[in-house]
Image (cartoon, grey):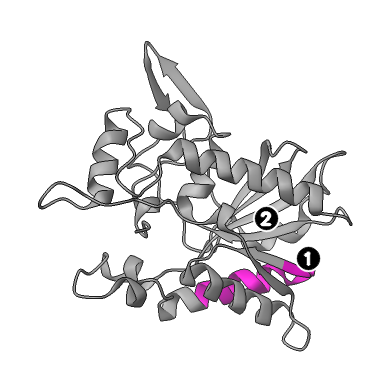
Amino acid sequence: MTSRLLPTLLLACFPMLTQGTETKPASAPVARPFSEIANLPKAAAGAMRVYLMRHGESIANATGDDPKLTDAQKDKLSEKGGRQAAALGAALKPLAPRKIIHSPAVRARETAEIIAKTVDAKSPPTLNISKAFGPIETGKSATVGKSALQLLVESWKAGVDAKLEGGEDMATVAARVKKGLAEAFAANGDGGPLFIVSHGEVSISVLCDYDLKRTLASLLTFRFANAGMLALDVAKDGTPRVIGYFADVK
């Protein structure tokens, strides 16, 4: 089972302050409008520019993970999610992406498809799937009356990186994301920018520079926007430097 509501429970951890033994967020990133994306400077020398996007609103996001719906039904984009993906595609059009990597989740694939068609309907960018940028596998709950996600959130509030049966912990998510970016760097022969459609918890991990303590301390305050995007300069080993956070600011 994968989580579709994590971004509503996670704080994007831009500069963190440590007070005693407790790590606390200093501030959340302020979203910049999509109109500013095309004006970003080129990637730093020796770095790969990565545009890391969260999928558009899913049915699960729109319905509060309605238990009456199946997982397959909830994994699709809502109508609003489709519009969000199209707006993101329009913003990316000046960057002329030729390849888009996306998570295996349906909501991520649908977002990537809409972005690709919006960028260039006649000759859209190619789409490539990557498990490295998939959502966290929440696993199975062994507690009656509580979902796997609820149990994970309780553990994160306590500063514990829990791993349920058949699932992942956030340390595993961070490791596979960093490895995925490093492998993408090695495979990026032309040195051009990389476009990835992923999930809120993946973006949270990157924002925190894969620091587990900071990630677990960053719960419940900041909601990473559907179809929001991070612009990153990524080093050869997958280490990111955040250039900006962008969303459809009205």
Q: Residue at x 46, y 21 (%)?
A: 17
Is 222 above or below relative to 90? above
Instruction: Check the image and name the residue furthest to the front.
Output: 166
Q: Residue 28: in sight, yes or no?
A: no
Residue 97 covered by magenta stretch: yes
Q: Residue at x 20, y 69 (%)?
A: 67
Instruction: Check the image and name the residue furthest to the bottom.
Output: 122
Label of residue 95 in the image = 1
Tags 1 and 2 in contact by the CB under 8 Å rule?
yes
Q: Main secondary structure of the magenta part?
A: helix
Image position of 239 (left or right of 156): right
Image location of residue 245, percent across then percent down = 59, 49
Image location of residue 132, percent across then percent down = 58, 52
Residue indicated by mark 2:
51
Is 234 above or below relative to 83? above
Q: Secondary structure at mark 1?
A: helix
